[in-house]
Structures are given as C-alpha cells and as structure tokens.
Amino acid sequence: MHKTSVSVIIAAAGMSRRMGNTSSKQLLKINSKSVIEYSLEAFSSSELVSEIIIVTKAEDIPKTTAIASRYPKVKSIVLGGAERYDSVRNAFAEVSGDVDIVAIHDAARPLVTTEFINKLFNECVEYGAVCPVGRVTDTVKKSENGTTVDDTIDRSLLFTAQTPQVFKRDLYEKALSLLKDSTIKFTDDASMVEALGERVHILINPNPNIKITHESDVGLAKLYLSDGGQMKIGHGYDVHKLVENRALILGGVNIPHTHGLLGHSDADVLVHAIMDAIIGALGLGDIGKHFPDTDEKYKGISSILLLKHVKGLLDEKGYGIGNVDATLIAQKPKLAPFIDEMKQNIAEALGCPVDAINVKATTEEGLGFTGDLSGISAHAVAIIQ
C-alpha cells in the first residue's frame, strides 16, 4: 500500500511591517528557540512529512540556514518573491515529484502541534483540501462607512483561517496556475483552491494557533509555549579552599579580601554550582566532565565564560532558564554589597532576566570549614524549560 508523503512549505519571507520592521518574526527568540524552530520541530516529528522547504528573504538566508541544519527533513531554502503567493510558488517548484500532499504553513505560527498536523493530513487524503480554522467568539458588526453599524453578522457562521493549509498536490498545482492570469491578490492558499470552484474542508483547531503579527503577540506566544514546555530541575554544589595570593571571584565579581579561592579556573564557587545545576537538569553529567581540571585551556579561565558555554548547551537542547536560586556560604567577607552585580553577570551570561536569578549569602555561625575560614561553598537549584 502506498504511504502518503507530505511536502511542507514554511512561508517565512514576510516583511514584518506590523512588527515595525524591527526584525524577521520567524527569527525572534521565544524561550531560547527561534519562532520558526517550533514549527520545524512539529513537522519534523510527523512520520508523514518527507521534506520541508523554507521560503525566506535574502537577508535571512544565513541565519535560517544555520537553524535548518539541525533539522534533516529540510530539503531546501528558497528565496521569496514580492508577494506571499510568489514566495509559495517559488517553493512549490522545489517539491519532489513523488509527493502526494502539500502543506503550506506560516512560520509566524509557532503553536502548531504534530498531533493536529497529522489530523490535517488524514483529512486531506479524504477531502483533497483542508483548512484549519478557529471559531469567532466576538460579536461581529458590519459597517460600510466605518462609523455606523449596518448589520450584525451571525458569528456561528464565521471562522478564522489558520495554517497549515493542506492540499493534494495536483489540486494545489492547478490552483497556482490561476496566479498567471488572475488580478486577485489571494490572502491565503485555500482562497486559490476555492477560486477553482473546489470545496475546501474545514477542521476546527481546539488549540491556540496564534499568528505573531504585533509585538504583543510575542508575550502571548511565550506564555503558551512556557505552559506547554517540559520543566526540569537540577541541583549543584561546589566548594573551594581559601588561600593567600589569589583573587576572590564570586559571581564574576572581584571582591576585595585577604584570601581567594584555589582552583584550576578562577575558582568562582558560585558560578560553578550554578553550572552544575544546569548541566544536571540537562542530564549531561557535571562540570568536571565538560571542563576538566587537567585541560590547560581552562587554567585561570573566567567561570562566567564557562557559564556562557553552558548557555550554549541549553540552546542546543532547546531549553531556557526558568529561574536559578543559589546560596553562598562564607564566614567572611560580607557579600551582600556585591550580590546585585553577581546577579547581573549571571543573567547576562545565561541570556535571561535578572529577576530569574536569585543569590543569597549566609554564614555557618563559625561552624565547619566555612566557619573556620578554610573555604567557601555554594548550593544552586536551576529550573529549565
């Protein structure tokens, strides 16, 4: 039995005019991943998808290529055209000849799920053309002059179109041929198929599927994606001996003191505990595995630089910092005056808000190795998602 094969076209060539042209929407970071990556992950996870074609602007090709390199199903990256349908037509030329179904998706819709994608594909096998929709919940007024109400529309008859819109390959190819002669500027792909006189089946999407259009949409998408993300927790602990003739570096801050911490790097016990917590949450061992004290390249290195490397591990795994809570245990010196600067350094290295980082300092009332000034220790807990 022939297995359905789907080619996905991800449209990412928009000008982001309603975002103020500040940047390309699909490259904005939400919870440590770019917007387009959420769609790439969802489509890549579908067994029915055989290839993905991204269409984008010339200036975005280098960054898009770097992102796409992590997703083996991406076949090609195509240059966009003057209008959306020009861009999609350019991408369609790259669709493989043995593909049955074509799906067109807006890169600015990061909430699409693999489960819903597969439902659309299955519906397309039966109906030939499927458009995901959302119900209109607000009362809708019609006004010709924009100042007075002419009519109130029955909202039970109205739906908002979403993507991915899915079509049998031959049908969509026929619809694209309309563009050669038509003066109509179609606002979505389903409209082109409708213009052929074909019926487009609708499938109500029970999940949020917002399109990032304005800056306020970024915060809303971040909220949805955070709630749906997987949370992991890691704990870190580190201790270093206090010795003479060493700088005391804590949280990247050089603190005036008679003694400093002994270690292969700058011995920043606070940052080491935080790194250990994050690496632990990722399930990647500990800092000794990643930064062995037998490696000369780490001798005397700033632990803040090592923390930036750990941030790279987070990015590779698709995680971001939820929050970090750390405790420094030191009899001397008094650390309270330096904590705000420590938090700032750590937040900058991890690419997260300062209020996601909490640092506390305490003594052990003269007890133990920290109490007798032999050393300083630190505990940290990190939540990643």
Image: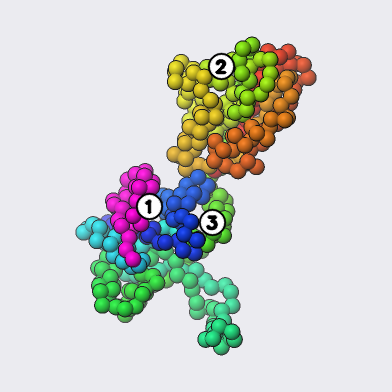
How many neighbours does mark 3 have within 10 angstroms: few (below 14), some (14-19), or many (20 or more)? some
- Answer yes or no: is residue 37 visible: yes
Residue type at the position of mark 3: Val
Disc 1 secondary structure class: helix
Q: CA distance from mark 3 to mark 2?
A: 43 Å
Q: Residue at x 54, y 59 (%)?
A: 215
Say what amino acid the circle numbered 1 marks. Asp
Quarter of the image holding residue 238?
A: top right
Q: Quadrant where the N terminus lies? A: bottom left
**Nearer the observer, 278 or 253:** 253
| Residue beneath disc 3 | 218
- The answer to which quarter of the image holds residue 347 is top right
Picture residue at 57% right of the left edge, 72% below the top = 137
* Secondary structure category for the residue under label 3: helix
Precedes in sequence: disc 3 or disc 1: 1
Residue holding disc 2: 263
Q: Which residues are magenta?
A: 55-82
In the figure, 275 relative to 198: above or below? Answer: above
